Amino acid sequence: MTDPTKKDDELAGTEQPFVQHLIELRDRLLRAIYGIAAVFTVLVFYPGPSKLYDLLAMPLVKTLPEGSHMIAVGVVSPFLVPLKVSVMAAIALALPWILYQVWAFVAPGLYKHERRLVLPLVAASTLLFYLGAAFCYFFVFGQAFPAIQKMAPASVAVSPDIEAYLDFVITMFIAFGVAFEVPIAVVILARMGVVTIAQLKSFRTYFVVGAAALSGLVTPPDPVSMIALLVPMCLLYEVGILAAQVFIKHTAAPEE
């Protein structure tokens, strides 16, 4: 006989067989792949792989000496490198759709208070990653590339390889995108009880030192780029502390 004093579990009766979970996972993965393929197909026709690479290379090309051009060392690099850019652009543009598929897969197994935590974090992490990559492209590259060109000896002809440039850009986009996820990391650590709000506030000095070391490692060798990464990380750390207090208050499990 059911104990009437015991509160019903809101997930009771929603369990599915393991095979059903695998089928659901397969369907979600296929939908994510179809979304990437659809965006990739559009990008191939408009604006086209070559135009996409030109857009990606614009911050560097504008700083090259007059008469200088980027070069392709590999035989198939002029074809493969723009194609890689198209694939990565398709994944980046389809990221909200991919994350929606992840959310749709895990949401049925979450309690209401857990959904209030996960959905905003997924949306915020996507937006912050986009902001980090955009900040890198529009500001950091504009400051770093002219500084790097000024450091080049007069006897050196500057003609960057297109594949090496792509690797550099990917590294920088990931570095800034991940760095802008600092508030998400702070919120998760505080919400899981790994650290308290008081501890996060007391760790400020250590965080600044660590962020400075990281900025020096991942950015080009100029002070502007380092500061451009360090300052947002420190500001976002403070945003994370404020956000953690709000999330802890509004996503707590209900009283039994």
Image (cartoon, rainbow, N blue to C red):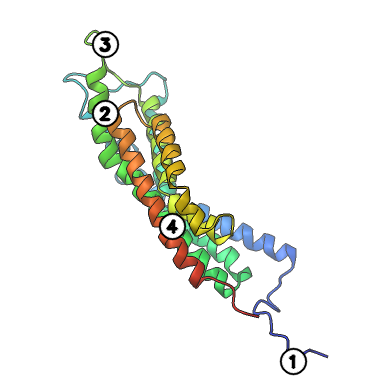
The amino acid beneath tag 2 is: Phe
Residue with the mark numbered 1: 4
**Residue carrying label 4:** 241
Q: Secondary structure at mark 4?
A: helix
Label 3 vs label 1, nearer the camera: 1
- At x 73% / y 90%, what residue is drawn? 5
Secondary structure state at the residue bearing disc 3: loop
Q: Secondary structure at mark 1?
A: loop
* Distance (Cα) linking label 1 and label 4: 41 Å
Q: Is residue 48 visible?
A: no
* Image coordinates for residue 167, horizontal then vertical, percent: 42, 30
**Does the residue at mark 2 contact the one at mark 3 (Cβ under 8 Å)?**
no
Residue 156: give its label.
Answer: 3
Q: Is residue 203 left or right of residue 220?
A: right
The foreground one among 207 and 24 is 207
- 96 up-or-down from 67: above or below: below
**Could you tell me which secondary element the residue under label 2 belongs to?**
helix
Could you tell me how far apart the alpha carbons at marks 2 and 4 are, in whole angstroms?
Answer: 34 Å
Query: Is label 4 or label 3 in front?
Result: 4
Residue 36: percent from the left, percent from the top?
Answer: 46, 51
Q: CA distance from mark 3 to mark 1?
A: 83 Å
- Image marks 4 and 3: residues in contact by CB distance under 8 Å: no
**Residue 45 shown left or right of residue 205 in the figure:** left
What amino acid is at disc 1?
Pro
Picture coordinates of residue 183, whole percent (x, y):
43, 54
The image quadrant of residue 22 is bottom right
